[in-house]
């Protein structure tokens, strides 16, 4: 039941997705589109290890700020995050949680762009944010599920404005 409950939790706000050809991950969608077992396992792993605590809502993230290095120290603290703007020590290493929509197309990853691959990003996040070491199989499964969040952005949405 974990997957069905988690899907329902994540799907409620996903009813207004900006990328029209990406199916909303609900139990009904899973039944209709019959996601491969690896993608289903990836979603289950994504939820069970704790990723959905921050990456949730209509864009599977993007709706909150979180400290980088919540459980284990972040590898590079050169950029102090929101503290540079607010001048509040509590905002040190606090960054906006990014959306995971189209994540396979948005590398390099993190606020500083220092991580080139999605697999490395998952490894870093699991360690620093959750205090977990993902297995290669878990990384492969989560990556497979994240790729289901990839779609074509409507051209009108990304067309540069014309100057007059």
Image (cartoon, grey):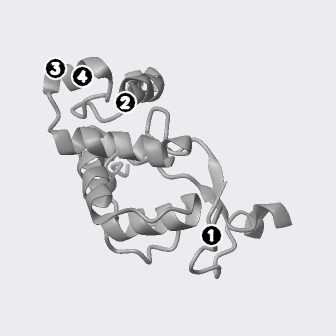
Circles 1 and 3: CB distance less than 8 Å?
Answer: no
Query: Can I make out residue 115 in this image?
Result: yes
Q: Regarding mark 1 in the picture, which secondary structure is present there?
A: loop
The Cα–Cα distance between marks 4 and 3, rounded to whole angstroms, is 5 Å
Residue visible at 44% across and 73% down? Answer: 113
Disc ID at residue 31: none
Circles 2 and 4: CB distance less than 8 Å?
Answer: no
Residue visible at 48% across and 61% down? Answer: 126
Vertical relation: 9 (above or below) 76: above
Seen from the viewer's position, the closer of residues 76 and 49 is 49
Residue beneath disc 3: 32
Q: Nearer the viewer, mark 1 or mark 3?
A: 1
Q: Nearer the viewer, mark 2 or mark 4?
A: 2
Residue beneath disc 4: 29
Seen from the viewer's position, the closer of residues 106 and 90 is 90
Crowding near the residue tagged with mark 1, few <14, some 14–19, many ≥20 C-alpha atoms within 10 Å: some
Circles 4 and 3: CB distance less than 8 Å?
Answer: yes
Seen from the viewer's position, the closer of residues 32 and 157 is 32
The Cα–Cα distance between marks 1 and 3, rounded to whole angstroms, is 40 Å
Q: Regarding mark 3 in the picture, which secondary structure is present there?
A: helix
Vertical relation: 75 (above or below) 34: below
Disc ID at residue 3: 2
């Amino acid at each position: 039941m974990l997957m069905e409950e988690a899907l329902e939790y994540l799907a409620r706000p996903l009813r207004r997705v900006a990328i029209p050809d990406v199916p909303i991950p609900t139990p009904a969608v899973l039944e209709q589109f019959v996601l491969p077992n690896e993608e289903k396992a990836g979603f289950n792993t994504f939820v069970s290890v704790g990723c959905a605590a921050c990456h949730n809502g209509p864009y599977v993230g993007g709706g909150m700020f979180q400290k980088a290095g919540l459980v284990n120290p972040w590898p590079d603290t050169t950029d102090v995050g929101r503290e540079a703007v607010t001048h509040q020590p509590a905002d040190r290493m606090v960054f906006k949680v990014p959306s995971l929509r189209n994540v396979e197309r948005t590398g390099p990853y993190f606020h500083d762009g220092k991580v080139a691959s999605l697999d490395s990003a998952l490894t870093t996040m699991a360690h620093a944010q959750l205090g977990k070491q993902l297995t290669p199989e878990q990384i492969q499964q989560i990556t497979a599920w994240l790729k289901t969040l990839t779609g074509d952005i409507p051209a009108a949405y990304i067309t540069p404005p014309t100057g007059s």
